[in-house]
Image (spheres, grey):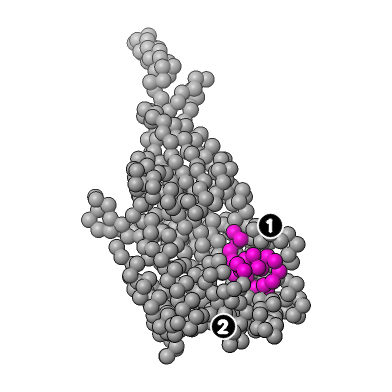
Amino acid sequence: MKLKKYAIFSGLLGILAVLVFTGQLCSQSEPIPKAFTLEFWGVFDEEDYFQAQIAAFKANYPYVTIEYKKFRQEEYEQALFDAWAKGEGPDIFAVPNSYMGKYKEFIEPMPQAMNVVTVTTESTLGKEETVAQAQAIKSWTPSQLRALYPDVVYMDTVYLHKTEDEKTATEKVFGLPLSIDTLALYYNKDILNQSQIALPPLTWTEFLEDVKKVTLIDKQGNIVRSGASMGTSNNIPRFFDIVSILMMQNGSAMVEDTNVVFTQPSTTQEGYYPGVSAVDFYTSFASPDREAYSWNEDLPEAMTYFAEGNVAFFLGYHYMLEEIQSESPNLNFDIASLPQVDPNVKVNYANYWNYSVAVNSEQSDMAWYFVQFLCSEENAAIYLEETGRPAALKNLIATQEDIYELTPFLDQLLTAASWYRGREPEAAENIFAEMIDGINDGVLTLDEAVKSTADKIELTYYE
């Protein structure tokens, strides 16, 4: 009886050995997918910014090749639409946060789970074997976006969407960012020092007082030195953002559902129109008969004029810093947080790019998985190290606190906001320009200009 048991046991060991060495006892392996390429398009990112992340991704997905292509900003949009018209184009593409509404129909929203095949090499008794395993990886949910990013990301990238399999629309994620920029106050330290202004202004009231102190106008009415580049549309970069944040800080709601409402009166102060008042404040800097007068449409482009040392205060983003330093390496300037209407209720303005997956991508699950992988904390940190840009993920804000030039931008991230411009964001900007120009030229009254602007932008809120 013992010999019989031993024979059976020996036989089982023999079978087991055969199974091990033939690989038949290893975990069930999927077929390795056929190789394919994910095209990735962007504007301000260099290919080097993604090399380490792509290499790490490819280690587990060797059948996936990711090709990044950088475009000039002026050619990017046309290249996208031309490619899509031919049924081509990128799998992954970058979208400005203010253009998400325009591009929404061209984006495949993030699925609940991304079905991918992971390929790994396992070693058993000295023998290496390639194993492919199908996985359903959970996507970040809209609720997780609220936890991971400043609130503005949820507001800009989450939309109601219904697939063919769903009875009702649910919230879906349409993009993820790696960095978030905010509007800040650049100031010329030499000009402020000469005027005995020790610190940059914290409020717009202080800002106006400082502008009055430093502006120089000759007897002919020419602006010799500008206190601030404010008030016009033709020579101030991102004037739309400046007017928008003045409205928002002043307590104006911008949009309710599909209605543009920045013409409405204050809900707390009877007879006060915060949106109209904000536009009046902005244009006052370009009005010769107002105490704020320090700028006009005949002056050079504002960032260049600031770099040349002729402007005390310039409102700009972090991405402008490198150009200012390049143009004027000896300029004595610094950057402060954006002035506020009420320092106890801070509101700042966000400007950033999201990474989205094209609706016509044949590999949308893998494309979305790469976007989520790229925007994870570990890989986003690599990107920020390469670019020197301010973080988007909340967990990475603290890791940049020792970078002096990022301080004002990081301090503004959690209070950053934006607003939905409609399906035609370029049109909204042009309409704002018409409003500013109409007021400055005396063609429209303040109330007429703001009312007309809201009505025109509302027409772009079509579905």
Q: How many marks?
A: 2
Q: Which residues are magenta?
A: 300-320
433 falls in the magenta region: no
Query: Would you say residue 267 is visible in this rendering?
Result: no
**Position of 130 relative to 441 (above/below):** above
Q: Amino acid at mark 2?
A: Ser
**Position of 230 relative to 172 (above/below):** below
Q: Name the disc covering residue 326, or none.
A: 1
Work out which residue is located at the far bottom of the displayed protein and give it: 270
Q: Amino acid at mark 1?
A: Ser
Which residue matches tag 2? Answer: 287
Which residue shows up at 56% across the image and 46% down it? 46
Mark 1 near mark 2, Cβ–Cβ under 8 Å?
A: no
- The image quarter containing residue 98 is bottom left
- Circle 1 packing at 10 Å, graded few (<14), some (14-19), many (20+), is few
Which residue shows up at 60% across the image and 51% down it? 387
Q: Name the disc covering residue 230, or none.
A: none
Left or right: where 282 falls relative to 12: right
